[in-house]
Amino acid sequence: MSLKVYNTLTGKKEEFVPINPGEVKIYTCGVTVYDVNHVGHGRSLIVFDMIRRYLRYLGYNVKFVRNFTDVDDKIINRAKNECLPFTVIADRYIKEYFQDAENFRIEPADVEPRVTTHIPDIIDFIQKLIEKGYAYEVEGDVYFSVRKFKDYGKLSKRSIDELIAGARVEPGEKKKDPLDFALWKASKAGEPSWDSPWGKGRPGWHTECCAMIFKHLGETIDIHGGGLDLTFPHHENELAQAEALSDKPFARYWIHNGLVTVNGQKMSKSLGNYITLKEIYSKYEPDILRLLVLSVHYRSPLDFSWEKMEETKKAYERLKNTMEEYETLKKLPENPDFEDHLYDAIAKAEQGFYAAMSDDFNTPEALASIFGLVREMNILKDKAVKEGGISKKALESYREAKEVIHKIGKDIFGLFDSLQPCIEKDIEDIAVEATAELKEMEKEEKELIEMLIEIRNIARKQKNFEIADMIRDRLSEQGIILEDTPVGTKWKKK
């Protein structure tokens, strides 16, 4: 079953074919670290965590890079308001980010670069754009010349004429064309800055990701992702710079997750509906938000509400309770005549799940397949309880159904971290195996002790008492007492 993904660049679903067979390179735009993370950040993190997990499940070796913008107007303004260095603000919210990511079980990226540690790479990237004639310097500022890149607007499906109508030059900008955007900003009094060929300054927002992608993933990557709001101008500007410099496609597939509203309104502090991840985590376990996010297709809008969190909590508890009923069924008497058809339901659920996931990561349909299996499991359980017994085959099918849900939920959706998989073997079998392993360990320990005693005896014969005493003392520390007798050295445990 081939994987199809919706490509923002082409506006259609396409078969996923990575650049190098078996390998996938993904970059997603990370957070600008000037404030705590909200539910919109959480959705993007969960979506791309799911995509990465599913690609890995399909057998791909995934390299995942997500950046931090740790110097920016918002960070600088917050630092001024709090009378702190901008680095203190950035470090504070990077720490908050990692805490939120850990709480919601977002797997760390393979590389998590910061803008301020890549200034030389960014300067080199900009210099090369100037040399190719795509950028120009004006009094310490460097701008990208949009009109020189003939494909500008192809990602966001905007024409130059449409863009001109809304373009303007901000106060203080010195660009030649209202469409041009800053790659490097000359420093202002009291702002952080770095030396460059154009004087002291700092990177523009749109160029930092390009330089970091080129450094960590190469000139062409498989997937570039982020929120839908980044499509224009951020990702459009990234694409223009990268392809102008390399003359190669920047990303094969552009994937954007839909935006989040709260009770039908745009999230805003002024409206009092700004929901932070910390607030969600204080009220619900991580799986509830993850399940809510996955219950909506990643490209569709997600309307958050506390009522929906409660509904999702009930659905999640239904999942957990069904899996935990296995312990109840194990206690029922054996009934060889008990019939069930759960294996067919398992096969149907697995087939439906992977068909949905391979159709542009359709998590709502995938979840529907899982809940269909849950329904069949509950039918079996109710029948067994009513009849007062269950066959070994039916019990085994229930266990397998539980394992399928647990594995899919944990490996791909990041759920059920607190639940343990079924123990397939009887407790007696486990005890036998553990005893055998213990005996093997004791045998190896005995052989090691006797080998050390032999080395000690050789050392004593050679009058190397320092080595002999060291071996005796080290064994003593481990609770092994040596006793030298006329018939040889004996040992025992304390």
Image: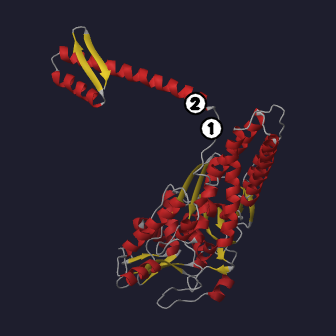
Tag of residue 423: 1
The x and y percentages for residue 415 are 62, 54
Residue 479 falls in which quadrant of the image?
top left
Colouring chosen for the image of the structure: secondary structure
Tag of residue 430: 2
Q: Give 376 or 97, whichever is nearer the viewer.
A: 376
Amino acid on which disc 2 is placed: Ile
Residue displayed at 71% across by 58% down: 363
Q: Is there CB contact under 8 Å for labels 1 and 2?
A: yes
Q: Is residue 350 above or below residue 360?
A: above
The x and y percentages for residue 380 are 80, 44
Amino acid on which disc 1 is placed: Ile
Q: Give 369 or 391, whichever is nearer the viewer.
A: 391
Residue displayed at 62% across by 46% down: 22
Tag 1 secondary structure:
loop
The x and y percentages for residue 213 are 52, 62
The x and y percentages for residue 192 are 37, 77
Tag 2 secondary structure:
helix
Q: Earlier in the sequence, mark 1 or mark 2?
A: 1
Q: How many marks?
A: 2
Res 266 seen here: yes
Q: Is residue 223 above or below residue 90?
A: above
Looking at the image, residue 59 sits to the left or right of residue 343; the answer is: left
Residues packed near mark 2 inside 10 Å, few (<14), some (14 to 19) or many (20 plus): few
Q: CA distance from mark 1 to mark 2?
A: 9 Å
